[in-house]
Image (cartoon, rainbow, N blue to C red):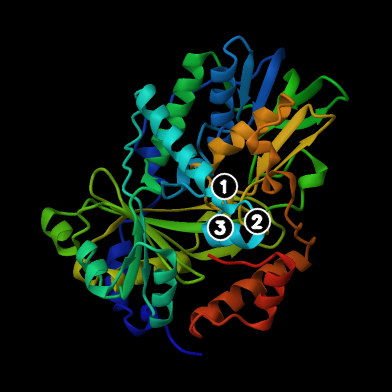
Amino acid sequence: MGTTVFERRRPDDAVVDHALSGARRSVFWLEDVERPQHPPVRGTVRTDLVVVGGGYAGLWTAVRAKERDPDRRVLLLEAARIGWAASGRNGGFCAASLTHGRENGRRRWPGEIDRLDELGMRNLGEIEETVARYDMDVDWERTGEMHVATEPHQVEWMREEGHFLDQEAVRAEVHSPTYLAGSWDPAACAMVHPGKLAVELARVAAELGVEIHEGSRVTGISGRGTQTLAIDGGGRVVADHVALATNVFPSLLRRNRLMTVPVYDHVLMTEPLTAAQLSAIGWRNRQGIADSANQFHYYRLTADGRILFGGYDAIYHFGGRVRAAYEDRPESFRRLAAHFFTTFPQLEGLQFSHRWAGAIDTCSRFCAFFGLARGGRVAYAAGFTGLGVSATRFAADVMLDRLSGLETERTEFEMVHTRPIPFPPEPAAAIGINLVRASMDRADHNEGRRNLFLKTLDAVGMGFDS
């Protein structure tokens, strides 16, 4: 196999050691925001709609439900704290795409992709309007996302994306010796503070009348008509309708247990850069950045001048469980740190202040799937596969449309009516997922050429791509 730029220009181990020496295992976004506490459920509560999950999907569902019908009683149940999981750990890329990129959507729904892209842009605009209307303090910046080529074979991919930047132009935007070309659409993505977005959505929901309960883990759901949710600790919620937004955690519906797997993503956050360090890298337009390999990095600036740098290693652990012990993987953090200084060698000496990881709710088609259960009383959305910051709002409207029995443009899409291919049970899941990861790594070292295994997965609709 060949090498990538991250191997050809690897920094000295001493640079990596110094950079990681003060990094503590903590999520910067959740430290950087004050999080009000909400009481757990006590006794039996009767409601019109109960939303399970206090991440973006659940919070948007609660907000949109009250915006549609202010008189509807809405409860939101969260097992731990609002926004503590994927919604508080992501990179803050609020991208317009509902299909994890146009190519993924075009391959799966060629007759719908143009309209799905239009609705994705409209959805992003509506998020921006919501942020302004409720005066939400979320560090919103509509700067777009720049994709960069770091290997010669990726340059043509940039041309195909449109908004092409040659080597001189892309390095004029951000000074990295690894960049060979780029593509930048300033309108199609916003940068946001993930922790603040979760807290502010909860604030808006509460002001609209949503009753929020933390520390209220749902252990079961039953009923043919009205649904009864059992809460850990003895509480109960009786509801006419239920919206499930549990994403990476085991579904309360048996039919969805094999539809997603938890894949762990890793992130580093630097200390604030000095004015001289910022000048050394340019980045005046503050766009988000992602490189273009199968195993890719994503990075962005924060409001206080730090750099978040994440991605590349996507780790699945046998059994498909979500465990805190999986969040500390030193080899992944060392690899990220090395790749950071390959990207920005002029920042040698900079240190990382935080390191963390989180589980992504990955499904085999890379974007959310939707459904109804229990005679139309229960709706669900899951499988956002790392691109849910904006898509969760669209998903909230899909769930509410379907719970209300409404026929809308959203509910008519094939994307909304079809389901991904499920993952196999263990041990086949671990074998297959790790074989995919090894094959993707081989492709990255072989000018992007996909082997027979990846081509077969592409053909049956389970193709993994970035």
The label on residue 264 is: 3
The one nearer the camera, 406 or 370, is 406
The one nearer the camera, 122 or 130, is 122
Q: How many discs mark residues in the rendered view?
A: 3
Residue shown at 57% from the left, 26% from the top: 214
Query: Quick check: can you spot residue 79?
Result: no
The label on residue 109 is: 2
Residue marked by disc 1: 116
Q: Secondary structure at mark 3?
A: strand
| Cα gap from disc 1 to disc 3, whole angstroms | 28 Å
User: Residue 348 occupies which quadrant of the picture?
Assistant: bottom left
Q: Secondary structure at mark 1?
A: helix
**Labelled pair 2, 3 in contact (Cβ < 8 Å):** no
Q: Position of residue 334 (x, y in %)?
A: 40, 68
**Relative side of 221 to 188, left or right:** right
**Earlier-in-chain disc, 1 versus 3:** 1
**Relative side of 166 to 438, left or right:** left
**Labelled pair 1, 2 in contact (Cβ < 8 Å):** yes
Q: Amino acid at mark 3?
A: Tyr
Q: Position of residue 7 (x, y in %)?
A: 39, 82
Relative to 199, residue 172 above or below:
below
Query: Quick check: can you spot residue 56?
Result: yes
10 Å crowding of disc 2: few (<14), some (14-19), many (20+)? some
10 Å crowding of disc 3: few (<14), some (14-19), many (20+)? many
Q: Amino acid at mark 2?
A: Trp
Q: Amino acid at mark 1?
A: Leu
